[in-house]
Image: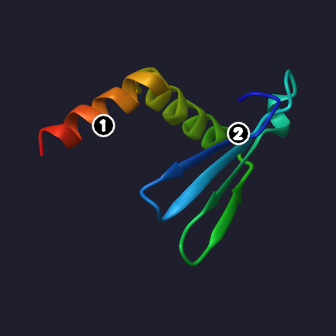
Amino acid sequence: MDAEPVRLRGGGTGQLLGAGFGPHVDLDVVHTEGLTSALYIEEADKVAAHRDAWQRLTSAALPVGASADLITEIRKNT
């Protein structure tokens, strides 16, 4: 995770915030929020699982401009 927090949103029901501290990966933390609860995740294996999921999502995602173009195209065809 980056030294700066990364905020993710998903489905309108919650979000994920990851905070990394450069070379000090033992200090990394993930904060998740749902509709009725929140959780801080500090265990290294669980933080790593969230980091891996985030990397898979970002590698599969279109760039912002391409996403906007795709949404526009879908709206035109529906």
Q: Nearer the viewer, residue 7 or 65?
A: 65
Q: Which mark is residue 50?
A: none
What is the C-alpha distance between the residues marked 2 and 1? 37 Å
Above or below — where is 58 with respect to 50? above
Left or right? Give the position of 27 relative to 55: right
Closer to the N terminus: mark 2 or mark 1?
A: 2
Residue 57 pos. (x, y %): 45, 31
| Helix, strand or loop under label 2 | helix
Residue at far bottom of view: 36
For disc 1, the neighbor class at 10 Å (few under 14, some 14 to 19, many from 20) is few
For label 1, the residue is 71
Residue at far front of view: 76
Residue at far left of view: 78
Q: Nearer the viewer, residue 47 or 72?
A: 72
Q: Nearer the viewer, residue 23 or 76?
A: 76
Which three-letter amino acid code belongs to the residue tagged 2? Ala
Residue 34 pos. (x, y %): 55, 68
Q: Are marks 2 and 1 in contact (CB under 8 Å)?
A: no
| Helix, strand or loop under label 1 | helix
Left or right? Give the position of 65 relative to 6: left
Q: Which mark is residue 44?
A: 2
Which three-letter amino acid code belongs to the residue tagged 1? Ile
The residue sitting at 74% across, 49% down in the picture is 42
The residue sitting at 62% across, 34% down in the picture is 48
Residue 9 pos. (x, y %): 54, 51
Please give the count of numbered marks on the rendered protein. 2
- What is the quadrant of residue 14 in the picture? bottom right
Residue 7 pos. (x, y %): 65, 45
The residue sitting at 49% across, 35% down in the picture is 53
- Quadrant of the image containing the N terminus: top right
For disc 2, the neighbor class at 10 Å (few under 14, some 14 to 19, many from 20) is some
